[in-house]
Image (tube, rainbow, N blue to C red):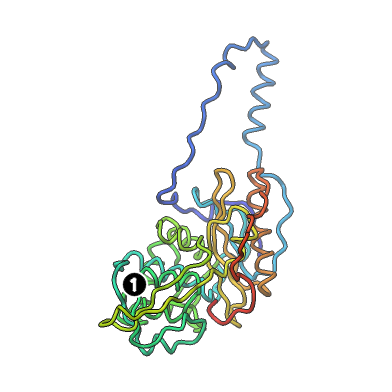
Amino acid sequence: MLYTRYNNSFSVPLRPQRIKAKSQAMPTQLIALRLSQPQFLLLIGTLLVLFSAPALALPTPEITARAAVLMNADSGEILFAKQPHTQLPPASTTKVLTALVALERLNLQERISVSARAAAVEPSRIGLQPGEVLYAQDLLYGLLLKSGNDAAEVIAEAVGGSVPGFADLMNDRAWQLGARRSRFQNPHGLPNEAHYSTAYDLTLIFRQAMANPLFADIVRTRSAGLRVEASVANNQRWRMVPVYNSNRLLVSYGGVQGGKTGYTRRAKNCFVGEANRGQVNLIVSALGSANRKALWKDVSAILDYGFAQYRLTRPASPVVLNPSPTTGSFSQGD
């Protein structure tokens, strides 16, 4: 089931902390024009047609994703949707909500210890060892760039006391945001039959997360180094762990502001992110693309379609002198 450019059944509030450009008044010189009555009526009719014209009739993007949504981040208008409310496994796009809950509840300068359970979680992992210590802010970089499932569980235990306790907080926050067809059982998105979301819900969650300046900064960062200390008692012994962003669009699609990838064998390839062109900010989500190459093609096609609604063409791709490893194989949770 496919929809394009509609808003009636998807009514969402204006995005927080977004400043919209002021509209400009019509030039007063028009009033002074000397027109005959027929000319005046023709002018008024022409203006009415121009300003009430529907969006451009553009070809609908052909995508492999099972579900997708494109939202205007400022107004909440839906510009494109395919199966927007179908409940699907979101893989590591789950970590957007994990980061949002953590940012709202954690002291970023808090030092957090790694449990044996968190260190043993299924990949992808940063490679944390039991007893090691990280600052909360470093854990967030590891969560969103490396997509570390170990970082996700460390955060969950620190904020919620346990993974189930943190999942309750996630579900409460999702409900508050209007993401009411989602259910989260863990902080990383590893397979669980009772863990699901929708393309529409993910756009709502990402929209709120991007209102947090640190989240927005992290997801646009291409690489970082995490300080991992040996123990709570010994912060003099530490190691630096490099992490790289798996969002290829940061280097291939001009205007991308950040995003989060996801993959499991069941979920296939997933993505949620934001791009800007001119004064237009668009959020795109895609769930279940056939493979990683198809995912980038799907997301790019959806964004191109959305920006074309505003008669905005794609700028040149960013110039990358020292590209970080944003391609390659992906393990579950990436």
- In-front residue for pair 6/21: 21
Which residue position holds label 1? Answer: 135
Quarter of the view holding residue 267: bottom right
Q: Residue sitting at 53 percent across and 79 percent down?
A: 333
Q: Secondary structure at mark 1?
A: strand
> Quick check: 164 left or right of 81?
left
Residue kind at label 1, given as amino acid type: Tyr
* Horizontal and vertical percent position of residue 263: 58, 77
Residue located at (66% from left, 19% from top)? 41
Vertical relation: 125 (above or below) 210: below
Compared with 2, 280 (above or below) is: above
Residue 99 spot, x, y in % from top left? 41, 68
Asked if 83 appears above or below 89 in the picture, the reply is: above
Out of 25 and 124, give the one closest to the viewer.
Answer: 124
Q: Is residue 67 left or right of residue 156?
A: right
Return the x and y of residue 40 as percentages of the image width and height. Answer: 66, 16
Instruction: Tell me which residue sits at (49%, 65%) in the image.
Output: 201
Depth check, front residue: 276 or 202 = 276
Residue drawn at x 33%, y 86% as measured from the top left: 131
Q: Residue furthest left?
A: 233
Residue 229 falls left or right of residue 324: left
